[in-house]
Image (cartoon, rainbow, N blue to C red):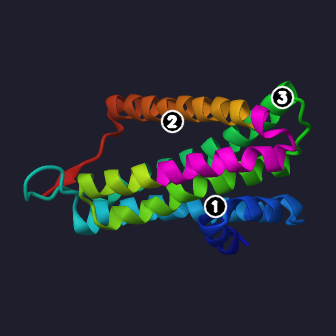
Amino acid sequence: MVVTHVVGMLFHPKQEWQRVDSSTDPLPSTFIQLALLAAIPAFCAYYAAVNIGWQLTGTERIFLTADSALPLALGMYAGLIVGVMMLARLAQWMGETFGATPSFRQCMNLALYCSTPLMLAGLSALYPQLWFIGLVGMAALAWSVQLLYSGVPTLMHIPEERGFIFASSLVTVGLVLLVSLLAATALLWTSGLHPVTTM
């Protein structure tokens, strides 16, 4: 179960990765966990945009209409799920280069648990101030990267030296996926799907 593993990875990540590696959870269970986790940032961002208002500068709050915030939240939800699945697929493809033969289930577990801190950081949207969300996001990103570097050797069954290079390659791929997601968002906004604000 994701909650047990997340708590374990906070306090003793290496042992928890071994538990994840030896677990027999079926792949559909991993997809369900991903669907639930991806809902956290999407829902929190939607709720904050419609009901709390984003405070970008000064004291003025910016609200979005429910109709314009909903497609953004659904797009974020879909983007998170697709991004994690693509990261898992790329990890499986890259595994062969590093002398590993991971299953897609192992790669999905790696991608899911490494992205979990970032998904949980979505709760920070309920206090929609950029400085706060930025701090929480940086802490979550550091935790995710640390989990990736400690999890790759265990789940991919490769030595730590090669695991470091593998994890560094995955970080690069993850950044490319993030930039692609941001570019897709910018394209959608310029094509008329930008949000409608209210005061």
Q: Which mark is residue 98?
A: 3
Farthest residue, direction front = 161
What's the amino acid at mark 3? Phe
- What residue appears at the point 90 percent right and 65 percent down from the top-left corner? 24
Q: How would you rate the neighbour count of disc 1 (Cα within 10 Å): few for under 14, some for 14-19, many for 20 or more? A: some
Point out the stretch of residues depicted in magenta: 140-162
Task: Please say whether residue 142 is one of the residues in the magenta stretch.
Answer: yes
Q: How would you rate the neighbour count of disc 2 (Cα within 10 Å): few for under 14, some for 14-19, many for 20 or more? A: some
Q: Which mark is residue 178?
A: 2
What's the amino acid at mark 2? Leu
- What residue appears at the point 77 percent right and 40 percent down from the top-left corner? 160
Mark 2 or 3, nearer chain start? 3
Residue 89, image x, y percentages = 76, 38
Residue 65, image x, y percentages = 26, 58
Q: Nearer the viewer, residue 159 or 65?
A: 159
Q: Nearer the viewer, residue 5 or 150?
A: 150
Report the Cα–Cα distance between label 2 and label 3: 24 Å
Dot 2 falls on a residue whose secondary structure is: helix
- What residue appears at the point 55 percent right and 45 percent down from the top-left corner? 79
What's the amino acid at mark 1? Ala
User: Where 109 falls versus 174 (above or below)?
Assistant: below
- What residue appears at the point 27 percent right and 60 percent down from the top-left corner? 128
Task: Please say whether residue 123 is one of the residues in the magenta stretch.
Answer: no
Which of discs 3 and 1 lies nearer the camera? The answer is 3
Task: Examine the image and state in which quarter residue 30 appears.
Answer: bottom right
Report the Cα–Cα distance between label 3 and label 1: 30 Å
Q: Which residue is mark 1?
A: 35
Dot 1 falls on a residue whose secondary structure is: helix
- In the visual, does 140 lie left or right of 81? left
Task: Examine the image and state in which quarter residue 103 appears.
Answer: top right
- In the visual, does 61 lie left or right of 29? left
Residue 66, image x, y percentages = 32, 61
